[in-house]
Every structure is written in C-alpha cells, then in structure tokens.
C-alpha cells in the first residue's frame, strides 16, 4: 500500500527509490569484478533494474560509474524504457542496443569488453512468489530450450571478452 502513496510515487518518478528483489541485488553485487572495468556489456538488459544496481555498485566500489557501459536487449520497447529509466536514476549508459544476443557480431560489431554480464532468458521460476501461475506454463521442453539458449549465449559471449575472465551469467532454469 505504501507504494501507492503520492509522495512515494513521486520519489519513483524522480529516481530516488528502486524496488527490486533480493535475488537481483545479489546478482548485481556478484557481477562487478575486483578492479573497475573500463567497459561492460550487459546482455538481456531488460528494463534497467540490474543496470541501475550495477552502476550504483560501481559508485560504491570505485567512486564512479563504469565509463563504457553498453546494454543489449532483443525488445526495442525494453531498450527504450531502459534509456528512460537510466536517465531518471542518473545512471550512465553509453549505448542502448536492440538485437539478437545469439548474433552479437551484428549488434556490437567487433568491440571487445572488459566485463560481460548476461541475464539469459529463463523460465521465470525465480519469481514464483509474485507470479505463481508460471509453474503451470513451464514444461520439460521449455526447460531444455532455456538451458540450451543460455549455453549458446555464454559460448558466444566468450568471443567478446578481452580476457577469458569476468563473464557472469544468470539464468533460472
């Protein structure tokens, strides 16, 4: 109910409050490497929740945001929403790209990144508390296809790294 209060809604619109689950916060906290990367590619960026968390974590860890921060999502409406939310929350995003993560050469070209984070498409089972109906929509074929897609994405992302470290993924199968 508190989230419906006018003063709380205003703080959301001003980028002063971000509501997210503990799992998203834990993932974002585990993605950042020990040393500040010059560049980060976030694949499956969605609506910017982890983008905001990652850049906020960068400020806490190193005193400033990651300078070259590129996001990719396969839905144009999510990429547009990400750009708006990043601006609202004061988060730096160098480029917001839309394209197929299974064909990243076509999306990001031959650029290499210090850190790559993939939030792979998944079953959504991690959100059962909020979306209990998911358990009836998932079957064995869906589980297998998500696992296969996640493995393909990670294999493709290895090619976009400057060094073979700092590739982090998240997927609820």
Image: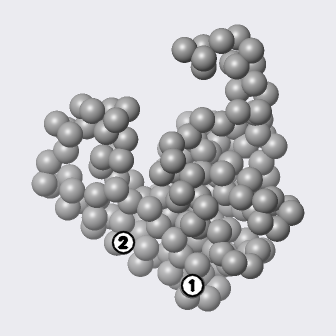
Q: Is residue 42 visible?
A: yes
Q: Position of residue 42 (x, y in %)?
A: 59, 61
Instruction: Find residue 28 and report its image quarter.
Output: bottom right
**Nearer the observer, 76 or 34:** 34
Asked whether, in this view, residue 118 is left or right of residue 55, the answer is: left
Q: Earlier in the sequence, mark 2 or mark 1?
A: 2
The C terminus - image quarter: bottom left
Q: Position of residue 109 (x, y in %)?
A: 62, 71
Neighbourhood count class around disc 2 (C-alpha, 10 Å): few under 14, some 14–19, many 20 upward: few
As drawn, the label of residue 165 is: 1
C-alpha separation, residue under disc 2 versus residue under disc 1 = 17 Å
- Per the image, label 2 sits on a secondary structure element best described as helix
Q: Position of residue 73 (x, y in %)?
A: 53, 51
The residue under label 2 is: 152
Instruction: Find residue 136 and report its image quarter.
Output: top left
Q: Is residue 72 visible?
A: no
Residue with the most extreme right position = 63
Asked whether, in this view, residue 68 is left or right of residue 28, the answer is: right
Residue with the most extreme top position = 6
Asked whether, in this view, residue 128 is left or right of residue 24, the answer is: left
- Per the image, label 1 sits on a secondary structure element best described as loop
Reply above or below: 77 against 171: above
**Nearer the observer, 169 or 35:** 35
Q: Position of residue 34 (x, y in %)?
A: 69, 78
Reply above or below: 93 against 164: above
At x 55% / y 88%, what residue is drawn? 164
């Amino acid at each position: 109910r508190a989230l419906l209060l006018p003063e709380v809604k205003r703080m959301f619109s001003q980028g002063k409050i971000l509501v997210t689950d503990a799992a998203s916060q834990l993932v974002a906290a585990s993605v950042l490497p020990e040393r500040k990367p010059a560049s980060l590619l976030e694949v499956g960026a969605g609506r910017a929740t982890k983008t905001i968390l990652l850049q906020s974590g960068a400020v806490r860890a190193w005193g400033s945001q990651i300078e070259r921060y590129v996001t990719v999502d396969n839905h144009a409406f999510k990429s547009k929403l990400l750009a708006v939310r990043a601006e609202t929350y004061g988060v730096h995003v160098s480029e917001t790209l839309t394209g197929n993560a299974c064909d990243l050469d076509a999306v990001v070209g031959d650029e290499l990144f210090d850190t790559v984070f993939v939030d792979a498409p998944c079953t959504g089972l991690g959100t059962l508390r909020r979306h209990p109906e998911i358990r009836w929509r998932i079957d064995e074929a869906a589980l297998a296809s998500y696992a296969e897609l996640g493995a393909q994405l990670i294999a493709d992302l290895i090619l976009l790294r400057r060094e073979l470290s700092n590739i982090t993924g998240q997927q609820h199968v």
